[in-house]
Image (cartoon, grey):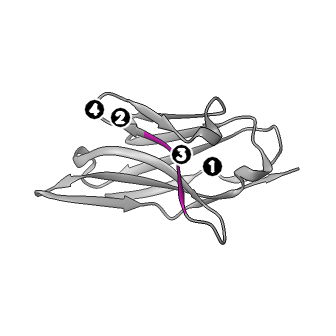
Amino acid sequence: VQLVESGGGLVQAGGSLRLSCVASGNTVSIHGMGWYRHTPGNQREVVARITVSDGTTTYADSVKGRFAISRDGAKNAMYLQMNSLKPEDTAVYSCKAQGIEDGWSFASWGQGTQVTVSS
């Protein structure tokens, strides 16, 4: 499975951005997807996750009420709508897909997209 993100950029605090992640390859093998972010000197943290089977979502406490994760199965796409952005949301955002293929579990990552929130 290959993942390509888009939609990052520079935005002022309080603004919004929408990230997209499009999957290709053996997409039927994907069980769950998620958005993660990473800043220099910090560990990568999970932002939001969604299951393919029933669309269950989970969020980091720091983004609850501001971010929304969603999927479009027909387009093999996942989105992250980010509202009320704060400077501390500045990071490289990456999408991840997990699943099982030929009896083996896998995890695929996109290349990442920079989100910068100015104060």
Query: What label does residue 73 carry, if any?
Result: 2
Q: Which residues are magenta?
A: 44-49
User: Quick check: is 36 in the magenta stretch?
Assistant: no
Tags 1 and 3 touching, CB below 8 Å: yes
For label 4, the SS is loop
Query: What label does residue 7 carry, if any?
Result: 1
Closer to the N terminus: mark 3 or mark 4?
3
Q: Which residue is mark 4?
A: 53
Closer to the N terminus: mark 2 or mark 4?
4
Question: x%, y% of residue 55?
Answer: 37, 29
Using residue 70 as the reference point, say whether residue 113 is left or right of it: right
Amino acid type of the residue that numbered disc 1 sits on in the rendered structure = Gly
Amino acid type of the residue that numbered disc 4 sits on in the rendered structure = Ser
Query: What label does residue 110 carry, if any?
Result: none
Using residue 11 as the reference point, say whether residue 46 is left or right of it: left
Q: Which residue is mark 3?
A: 20
Mark pair 4, 1: CA separation: 26 Å
Closer to the N terminus: mark 1 or mark 3?
1
